[in-house]
Image (spheres, rainbow, N blue to C red):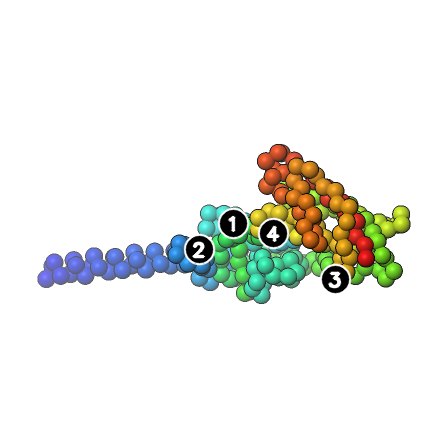
């Protein structure tokens, strides 16, 4: 009888341990070496919202202590992750920059170079912790269109890949600066850290110049720079210039 009770006690401890292990595993994205990346169970995390308006526009949560081994979580809303249009579906979250919040959602591992933090969360619920006023939306200008009658213009881009990065562009035509520049020049950074610049729709690129050590040359309707190659040569200030015409 004593042995039977002891056996039941040991089995109960083992079940409790296994159950705790499953719960702990669900708090972080589980590993899946034989299939696609998986997300964690539903979690609520508190931290400060930081907005990054660099080469990639993204929203970060800085928790007070490490979460799944990191203190940097990329936030999205509405799904789509880093591949979604419009800053990765984070435009609404940008209004919470500088605020301490509690967000609820599922964590995932950043499986490609498109992400800007080791893990991400698709936010399902959010609320401000304490007192903090929401900030106005920062304009994007990406929906702006070129002025009518502009047949030819020059784009000069300055790119700083280091840290949060920044892209500054100046667009001119007939000695006059054209604004906003985002109406005339586009860019993207892919998962392999290749930066590409291009003209507005309907314009063809010619007369490209770029930082030699990083330049991949002109490819179809865009020009490309290799950030990793530039980093290997310790070059952190890049330029990309080109003419657009139609």
Dot label at residue 42: none
| Horizontal side, residue 227 vs residue 4: left or right | right
N-terminal of the pair, mark 1 or mark 3, is: 1
Judge the density around disc 1: few (<14), some (14-19), many (≥20) Cα neighbours within 10 Å.
Answer: some
Residue 142, quarter of the rendered image: bottom right
| Horizontal side, residue 105 vs residue 19: left or right | right
Q: Which residue is mark 2?
A: 28
Q: How many marks?
A: 4
Q: Nearer the viewer, mark 2 or mark 4?
A: 4
Q: Which residue is mark 3?
A: 143
N-terminal of the pair, mark 2 or mark 4, is: 2
N-terminal of the pair, mark 3 or mark 4, is: 3
| Residue 198 visible in the snapshot | yes
Dot label at residue 118: 1
| Residue 101 visible in the snapshot | no
Q: Secondary structure at mark 2?
A: loop
How far apart, in angstroms, are the residues tagged by discs 2 and 3? 37 Å
N-terminal of the pair, mark 2 or mark 3, is: 2
Q: Secondary structure at mark 3?
A: loop
How far apart, in angstroms, are the residues tagged by discs 2 and 4? 26 Å
How far apart, in angstroms, are the residues tagged by discs 2 and 1? 12 Å
Q: Which residue is mark 4?
A: 190
Judge the density around disc 2: few (<14), some (14-19), many (≥20) Cα neighbours within 10 Å.
Answer: many
Q: Nearer the viewer, mark 2 or mark 1?
A: 1
> Mark 1 and mark 4 in contact (Cβ < 8 Å)?
no
Which sits in the foreground, 180 or 59? Answer: 180
């Amino acid at each position: 009888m004593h042995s039977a009770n002891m056996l039941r006690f040991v089995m109960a401890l083992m079940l409790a341990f296994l159950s705790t292990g499953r719960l702990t595993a669900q708090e972080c994205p589980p590993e899946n070496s034989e299939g696609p990346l998986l997300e964690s169970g539903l979690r609520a995390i508190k931290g400060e919202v930081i907005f990054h308006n660099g080469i990639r526009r993204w929203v970060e949560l800085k928790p007070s202590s490490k979460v799944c081994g990191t203190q940097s979580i990329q936030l999205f809303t509405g799904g789509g992750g880093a591949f979604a249009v419009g800053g990765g579906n984070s435009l609404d979250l940008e209004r919470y920059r500088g605020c301490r919040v509690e967000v609820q959602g599922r964590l995932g591992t950043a499986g490609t170079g498109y992400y800007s933090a080791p893990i991400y969360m698709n936010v399902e619920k959010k609320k401000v912790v304490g007192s903090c006023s929401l900030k106005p939306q920062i304009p994007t200008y990406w929906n702006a269109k070129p002025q009518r009658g502009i047949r030819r213009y020059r784009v000069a881009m300055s790119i700083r890949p280091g840290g949060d990065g920044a892209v500054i562009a100046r667009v001119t035509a007939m000695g006059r600066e054209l604004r906003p520049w985002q109406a005339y020049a586009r860019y993207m950074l892919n998962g392999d850290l290749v930066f590409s610049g291009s003209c507005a729709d309907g314009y063809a690129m010619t007369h490209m110049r770029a930082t030699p050590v990083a330049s991949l040359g002109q490819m179809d309707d865009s020009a490309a720079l290799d950030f990793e190659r530039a980093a290997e040569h310790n070059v952190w200030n890049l330029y990309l210039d080109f003419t657009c015409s139609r």
